[in-house]
Amino acid sequence: MPYKLDPSAMYRMPTHFGPRTGPRRGPSGERFACQDNPRSTIYAISFLSDSDSLAALLPPGFSLHGEPVATLSANYMSEIEWLAGRGYNTLGLTFPARYQGQVDDVAGHFLTVLWENLADPIITGREELGYAKIYCELPSPSVLRGEHHITASWLGFRFLDMRIGDLQPAPPQPPAKNLPSLHYKYMPRTGEWGAADIAYATMTPAEAPNRRIIEQAIGTGSFAFTRPRWEDMPTQVTIVNALADLPVHEIRSASLTKTIGGKDLRDTVILR
């Protein structure tokens, strides 16, 4: 007899083996508190770019919001409870945007792409949250004489070098207003290759009460994308080249932040 799906459970393909575990469902169906994990080390560089260039990356319903300052950030995570203590790394580029729908009007940080070096968070984040996740190799940074060197590669082709150095403890600042992250979920319709099965914006609220900053430093930074040929990165060449083409008028900030704790992102919602 064919199985039936339990509407109270969480499934991903393949569904034939029952509800699946992941960041929002533990082995017994429980949620993860994310109080003492993950441990994260985040490198970020913000830079002034060009309004038209950033706006060209926005999907329907979105517009640029404020100054065209983009942020490139790499996050190295460990001790993740939903991975039974393992970790993974991410690399993403965001910039301020506004979504105006029939119901919702929200400003936040639009995520253009998020590379990760493990399939499990890529699949769960794409299917459940609508995050624009894809794969690349993200080894731990090398550190020499105080300079942190971050690299990203795809099957051996290095497409990003990012350096942050001259780090000094960040001076105390009043709490900033945190903005949500904005995303565009798109899944193609099988057999109708120009059509979408689903296409809508999603939002993850910024609030993460379990997240604690344990160290923060500011310094100097630089980055450079290496433009691939199709032969170098056949499935990602347009993504990397679009980011390589973004004008960099001025580096606004470079930072290193270490945190503990977070959330399971279950509060992500569809924007309408």
Image (spheres, rainbow, N blue to C red):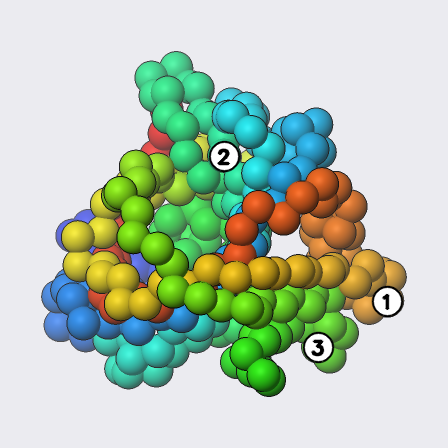
Residue 212 picture location, percent across and down? 22, 61
Which residue in the structure is indicated by mark 2?
A: 96
Residue 112 picture location, percent across and down? 56, 45
Q: Earlier in the sequence, mark 3 or mark 2?
A: 2
Residue 258 picture location, percent across and down? 35, 68
Taking the spot 50% from the left edge, 30% from the top edge, the residue there is 97
Residue 243 picture location, percent across and down? 70, 49
Tell me: residue 65, above or below residue 180.
above
Taking the spot 45% from the left edge, 54% from the top edge, the residue there is 126
Label pair 1/2, CB-CB below 8 angstroms: no
Three-letter residue code for mark 3: Leu
- The disc placed on residue 83 is none
- The disc placed on residue 231 is 1
Which residue in the structure is indicated by mark 3?
A: 155
Q: Nearer the viewer, mark 1 or mark 2?
A: 2
Q: CA distance from mark 3 to mark 2?
A: 31 Å
Circle 3 residues within 10 Å: few <14, some 14–19, many ≥20 = few
Taking the spot 40% from the left edge, 70% from the top edge, the residue there is 41
